[in-house]
Image (spheres, rainbow, N blue to C red):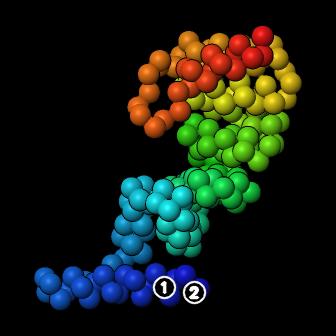
């Protein structure tokens, strides 16, 4: 309820500023407000290690609790903020809403890995891999799950597959799955 009042207050202030600059502004519908929140979540949700995304995501979930994007972005924001239990909760909801989203499954698997729940990470990442069989990020994190579960043969298989499917060069600042998979493959042999 408190979030709704804050959100309504924010929306009213935006409308007042618009009216001051451009004249009359009609009241926004719940759907329009929600769409603006999701758009802002998509573009600025990672700000302050996910803190801003958490704030916006909680507002979006309050408006439409069964919306995939609200749950997905909120879960990702919690994961970015190192709040894996909350990330898992919201990403599991996103997967219930859209079980064919390999992005939601992948992020859920990563959160399970970060939470040291390797068995569930493996299960979810295998589901994600069924939906996107050549995704090197999914393959790489599945190899890590097998590695953590001490399933050496499977870990070797998936590290090798990650090397085969990953681009050798990634954008500056991104994880090089290729290099890391090669390094881990050598250690495990």
When asked about the image quadrant of residue 136, the answer is top right
Please say whether residue 5 is visible from this viewpoint: yes
For numbered disc 2, what is the local secondary structure?
helix
Q: Residue 121's quadrant in the figure? A: top right
Classify the position of the N terminus by image quarter: bottom right
Give the class, few, some or many, for how many residues have Cα within 10 Å of label 2's Cα (few <14, many ≥20): few
Which x, y percent locates residue 10? Answer: 40, 83
Residue at left offset 68%, top offset 58%: 83
Above/below status of 84 relative to 16? above
Q: Which residue is mark 2?
A: 2
Q: Residue at x 55, y 40 (%)?
A: 103
Instruction: Identify the image quadrant of the C terminus.
Output: top right
What kind of element bears circle 1? helix
Front residue of 75/160: it is 160
Check disc 1: other Cα within 10 Å, few if <14, some if 14-19, many if 20+. Answer: few
Is 86 located above or below residue 11 in the figure? above
Residue at (79, 25) in percent of width and height: 147
Relative placement, left or right, of 182 versus 152 is left
Q: CA distance from mark 2 to mark 1?
A: 6 Å
Do labels 2 and 1 touch, CB within 8 Å? yes
**Residue 114: x %, y % from top left:** 72, 45
Q: Residue 125 location in percent, x, y?
A: 68, 33
Q: Name which residue lies at 59% across and 53% down.
A: 80
Q: Residue furthest right?
A: 150
Q: Which mark is residue 6?
A: 1
Residue 47 horizontal side relative to residue 22, left or right: right
């Amino acid at each position: 309820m408190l979030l709704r009042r804050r959100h309504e207050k924010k929306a009213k202030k935006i409308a007042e500023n618009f009216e001051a600059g451009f004249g009359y502004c009609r009241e926004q519908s719940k759907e329009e407000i929600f769409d603006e929140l999701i758009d802002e979540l998509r573009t600025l949700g990672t700000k302050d290690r996910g803190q801003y995304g958490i704030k916006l995501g909680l507002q979006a979930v309050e408006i439409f609790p069964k919306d995939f994007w609200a749950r997905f972005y909120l879960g990702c924001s919690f994961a970015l903020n190192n709040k894996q239990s909350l990330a898992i909760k919201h990403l599991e909801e996103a997967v219930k809403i859209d079980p064919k989203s390999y992005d939601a499954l992948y992020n859920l698997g990563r959160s399970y890995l970060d939470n040291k729940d390797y068995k569930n990470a493996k299960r979810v990442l295998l589901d994600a891999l069924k939906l996107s069989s050549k995704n090197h990020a999914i393959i790489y994190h599945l190899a890590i799950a097998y590695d953590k579960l001490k399933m050496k043969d499977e870990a070797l298989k998936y590290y090798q597959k990650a090397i085969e499917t990953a681009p050798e060069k990634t954008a500056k600042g991104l994880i090089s799955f290729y290099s890391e998979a090669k390094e881990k493959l050598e250690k495990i042999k």
